Amino acid sequence: MTKRALDPDGLPSPVGPYSNVVATPPGRMVFVAGQVALDANGEIVGAGDVAAQTRQVMENMRIGLEAAGATFADVVRVVNYITDVDLFGQMAAVRKEYLVEPYPASTLVEVSALMYPELLIEIEATAVVAE
């Protein structure tokens, strides 16, 4: 699959590893539910550490993508839920280790809480895999 990042005139340049618009050819869509910093045993990883939690989230996402025959190169959109927008820089730095250029479209939403009080970040993804 070849995804293309578009930078339309009139939109601000992306701040961080994301694209404003991503276009894909036809293919099979893969939806990865919001992933949080829980390990395979359901234990919280990195309580109070958004970088450690983001790394666990991205590893969980990698496992989910691979199960569907996809990789981070196929991801066209991510939605990030964070409990404190001031932690964005730390989260984005870890995300950049996983996301592949052209970066996916991305939305960041600050939320009051996630499923457990120790969780700081949740990320969901959509990928398109060429058939």
Image (cartoon, rainbow, N blue to C red):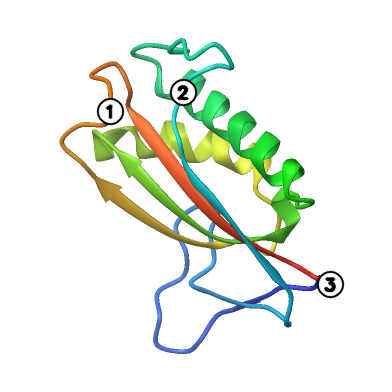
**Residue 47 x %, y %:** 37, 11
Residue 70 in the image, given as x and y percentages of width and height:
76, 52
Quarter holding the N terminus is: bottom right
**Disc 1: which residue:** 115
Q: Amino acid at mark 1?
A: Met
Disc 1 to disc 2, C-alpha distance = 11 Å
Q: Nearer the viewer, mark 1 or mark 2?
A: 1
Left or right: where does residue 66 sit relative to residue 110? right
Q: Is residue 68 above or below residue 84?
A: below
Answer with mark 1 or mark 2, whichever residue precedes in sequence.
Answer: 2
| Left or right: 81 in relation to 45 | left
Residue drawn at (48%, 14%), measured in percent from left and top? 42
The numbered mark at residue 131 is: 3
The three-letter amino acid code for the residue at tag 3 is: Glu
- What kind of residue is marked 2? Ala
Query: Is the Cβ of the residue at disc 2 closer than 8 Å to that at disc 3?
Result: no
> In which quarter of the view is residue 76 placed?
bottom right
What separation in Å lies between label 3 and label 1 (alpha carbons)?
35 Å
With 102 as the anchor, is 32 left or right in this view?
left
Which type of secondary structure does the marked residue at label 3 adopt?
loop
Mark 1 closeness class: few <14, some 14–19, many ≥20 residues within 10 Å: few
Whether tag 1 and tag 2 are in contact, CB under 8 A, the answer is no
Judging by the rendered image, the residue that carries numbered circle 2 is: 37
Crowd band around label 2 with a 10 angstrom C-alpha radius: few (<14), some (14–19), many (20+)? many
Q: Secondary structure at mark 1?
A: loop
Q: Quadrant of residue 27?
A: bottom right
